[in-house]
Image (cartoon, helix red, strand yellow):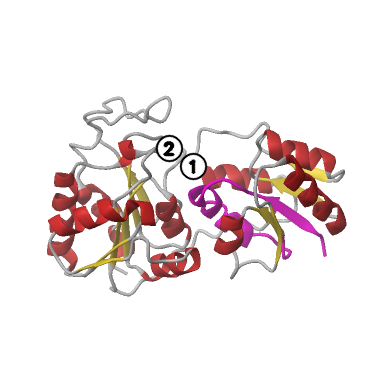
Amino acid sequence: MKRVGIIRFSALGDIASTIPVVRACKYPPTLITSPIGQALYQDECDSFVVMRNKSVREGFRALSEIWRNHFDVIVDLQSNDRSRAMTALALTRRVNSKGTNQQQQTTKILADIAHRTDCFNPIDMSPESREKSFIVLNVGSSEKWISKRLPDCKWIEFAEKLKDRFELPFVMTGSAEELEYVQHIARLIPGKIEVAAGKTTIPELKQLLKTACLTVSTDSGPMHLSAVQKTPTIGIFGATNWIRSAPFGPWSVALFDRTYFATNHPPASSQLIVGDYYTNIRIEDGLDHLGLYLDQ
């Protein structure tokens, strides 16, 4: 049995997008990750090397753990300067993103890296049925990424159409720092609403998104976490790249304003400035696209 190390740090969405690749590994891998990654994968992996911070001292401590594992190959799904330095010092076979097509959805890029070894099966693209339980609305973003937030009227419009079509309750997710904004939107939209923002651990959020029958979300960690668990997911885009950051799988779709972005090309770089990115997005387009998966 081969010993496989997989490197993936960064934010929740980046680590979540790796889940289909990790699940495709033919051998139980060791995940080289952050505390967020360890929390997210605690029900998926038994072995971790956890980088608790970005200090040089912590890097060498983690490197000593990597040496003790005697990996046959390290799959560098992070592919930044820090991970490249670590894998070079690991003195074993390594693969990274060099030479891969970066103009595609993130999980596909990660799968292309992994499949440079013989340690991974094809990514599982089979859909799963969902009970008509509840709809997750993930409306928020961090203060840095306030440009991802839609005008209030769009969430009112989306919620009205979702309520009319499904007659299901809404669960509104988000972090503790997003709670005030989420509560603000919750007061505006119709229907039965539970605000879960700031109340869930990462494993609890993972389970919540897995049991939803639909997630509608800004470009965020919960959007990616929903999609990789095969929950039908509608990602709402404007300030960020909907090609690379699209939610995973045929049961997901990225919506953007085709009037504002008349050429169908995403912004050349992510936009921190708030703009009129969302006015003409129609939630019906996403529901029509996912009709096969929503009707199962």
Answer left or right for 151 relative to 254. left
- Structural crowding at the residue carrying mark 1, measured as other residues with C-alpha within 10 Å and reported as few (<14), some (14–19) or many (≥20): some
| Residue at the image point whose x is 63% and y is 58% from the top | 22
**Left or right: where does residue 51 sit relative to residue 292?**
right
Q: Residue 111: image x %, image y %?
A: 61, 48
Task: Say which residue appears at 21% left-offset and 49% top-offset.
Answer: 283
Determine which residue is flagged by label 1.
105
The x and y percentages for residue 20 are 56, 57
Q: Mark 2 is on which residue type?
A: Ile
Question: Are dots 2 and 1 in contact, CB under 8 Å?
Answer: yes
- Hey, which quadrant is residue 175 in on the image? bottom left
Q: Quadrant of the N terminus?
A: bottom right
Residue stretch in magenta: 1-29
Residue 128 visible in the snapshot: no
Q: Is residue 273 magenta?
A: no
Residue placed under numbered mark 2 in the picture: 243
Task: Tell me the distance, in whole angstroms, between the alpha carbons under discs 2 and 1.
Answer: 6 Å
